[in-house]
Image (spheres, grey):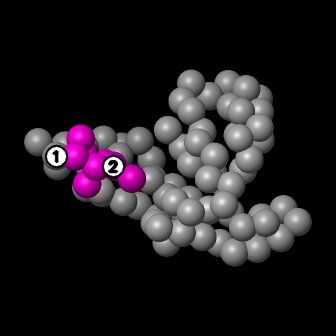
Amino acid sequence: MAISADTPEEARGLCQRAGLTFPILSDHRADTIRQYDLLLAGSGIDGRDISGPAEFLVDSSGTVRWRKLIEAGPEQFLEAGKMLN
């Protein structure tokens, strides 16, 4: 799943246009984005707040086990998943 500062309508539209097979959750007020310290205030279109790119691996208890604050490739994500075993 992904989290975006877009409105729910914008997030749905993005999923449809891009043919994504995973959901994009709307965090229009950027509450979750702030909790993960990813807010890029005023960096979006028309000065909107947006999130910086980040990837997280969260275990079944909700604990963040790995995080990368720039876009990681699938190989890096799979390697991080191996550390959970």
Q: Position of residue 24 (x, y in %)?
A: 60, 39
Q: Which residue type does callout 1 highlight?
A: Leu
Residue receiving disc 1 = 84
Please report the bounds of the magenta region as a residue range: 56-63
Instruction: Report whether 55 appears left or right of 13.
Output: left
Q: Quadrant of the C terminus?
A: top left
Q: Which residue type does callout 2 highlight?
A: Leu
Residue 18 belongs to magenta span = no
Looking at marks 1 and 2 on the same chain, the residue that comes earlier in the sequence is marked by: 2
Secondary structure state at the residue bearing disc 1: loop
Residue contact at pointers 1 and 2, CB within 8 angstroms? yes
The local crowd at label 2, few if under 14, some if 14 to 19, many if 20 or more residues have their Cα within 10 Å, is some
Q: Nearer the viewer, residue 59 or 28?
A: 28
Q: Position of residue 11 (x, y in %)?
A: 70, 40
- In the displayed structure, 74 sits above or below 44; it is above
Q: Name the mark on residue 63.
A: none
Q: Name the mark on residue 57.
A: 2
Q: How far is the residue under mark 1 from the one under mark 2?
A: 9 Å
